[in-house]
Image (tube, grey):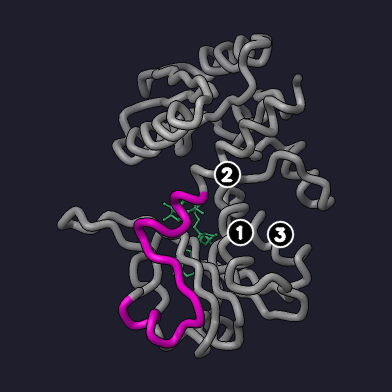
Amino acid sequence: LHVLLVGENPASAVYVAMKIKRAEKIGIKSHVHRFSSTVTQSTLSQAIADLNANPAVDGILLQLPLPDGLNAHELLNAIDPSKDVDGLHSVNMGRLMQGKHTLAPCTPLGCMQLIHQWKHDLAGLCAVVVGRSNLVGLPLSLMLLQAGATVTICHSKTSDLVAHTLLADIVVVACGRPGLVTAAHIKPGACVIDVGINRLGDGTLVGDVDFASVAPIAGAITPVPGGVGPMTVYNLMANTLRAFKSRV
Ligand code: NDP
């Protein structure tokens, strides 16, 4: 597993360290390629091309976000789709749309596994995903749809968020807005998945859901830290294993 880490984003450094630690622990050899925030697009493209060509490399991960001035979309699409363990290459996103994915984005996969722990069969359930990013909200919405849920996607332009979330059996929040969702947004018994990771001024990590008010009425709820985050790392390992197996 080869990770490209660009710049000095402290959160990215922590996430990469967690991924590498987990990989080493389960026996996946890993390596971090560090680049300064002034690195050029062509240097990164060349580094990716070298990893694509190296038969000893099974997984390539470009840690996001990238510093301003770099084109993440172009670099993600430079990764060999069969080594794209983050599942963000256009080919893998397209396969996900067609329901034939082998390498799908790690965080949405983790959300689905958590939701299935709550209920195995999602057919007929109403799901609201708050957030429509390519990384989380959009792929997760597709996965929920493919699992038979009726899906509503909300975002920053949604005029009445609570009107949607209150009807939902499943609410997934992936916005990066602490306290966005409170007890007033949640139907009693609903499954609430909090993807958000926000560091407050005092250093505390919180999600997008007000856990204290929502937990007593939710049927199931994930905490931050400790809920979706570890599932993301787990699925990165699973994708790396899938990529390895597809090459042997
Ligand atoms: P983005 O910033 O790419 O997307 C955020 C989404 O939230 C956008 O679609 C935006 O809408 C929407 N949004 C923002 N404000 C509101 C609002 N007030 N009401 C409704 N929707 C809103 O973020 P990511 O998807 O990359 O990440 C989301 C969060 O999840 C972050 O906190 C991130 O740190 C965390 N994260 C956690 C992971 C984990 O493993 N636990 C992994 C990846 C991310 P619009 O499109 O209209 O701008």
**Which residue, given by chain and number where applicable, does mark 1 sit on?**
113
Q: Which residues are magenta?
A: 212-231
Quadrant holding the N terminus: top right
Residue 72 falls in image quadrant: top right
- Quadrant (top left, top right, bottom left, bottom right) of the C terminus: top right
The residue carrying pointer 1 sits among few (fewer than 14), some (14 to 19) or many (20 or more) residues within 10 Å by Cα, namely some
Which of the two labelled residues, at mark 2 and mark 1, occupies the earlier sequence position? 1
Residue 225: x and y, percent? 35, 57
Q: Is residue 214 magenta?
A: yes
Q: Amino acid at mark 2?
A: Asn
Question: Which of pointers 1 and 3 indicates the residue nearer the eye?
Answer: 1
CA neighbours of label 2 inside 10 A, class few (<14), some (14 to 19), many (20+): many
Answer with left or right where residue 38 lies relative to residue 47. left
Locate residue 7 relative to residue 114 in the image: left or right.
left
Q: Amino acid at mark 1?
A: Gln
Of residues 164 and 56, the one drawn nearer to the viewer in this rendering = 56
Marks 1 and 3 close (CB-CB < 8 Å): no
Tags 3 and 2 in contact by the CB under 8 Å rule? Answer: no
Query: In the structure shown, which secondary structural element does the residue marked by tag 2 occupy?
Result: helix
- Ligand 1 within 8 Å of the CB at mark 1: no
Disc 3 vs disc 2: which is toward the camera? Answer: 2
Residue placed under numbered mark 3 in the picture: 143
Say if mark 2 contacts mark 1, CB within 8 Å. yes
Look at 46% across and 72% down and name the residue there: 221
Residue of label 2: 235
Q: Position of residue 94 (x, y in %)?
A: 78, 44
Q: Residue at x 64, y 73 (%)?
A: 119
> Distance between the Cα atoms at labels 3 and 2?
15 Å
Residue 22 is situated, as x and y percent measured from the top left of the image, at: 44, 35
Front position in the image: 213 or 132: 213
Secondary structure found at label 1: helix
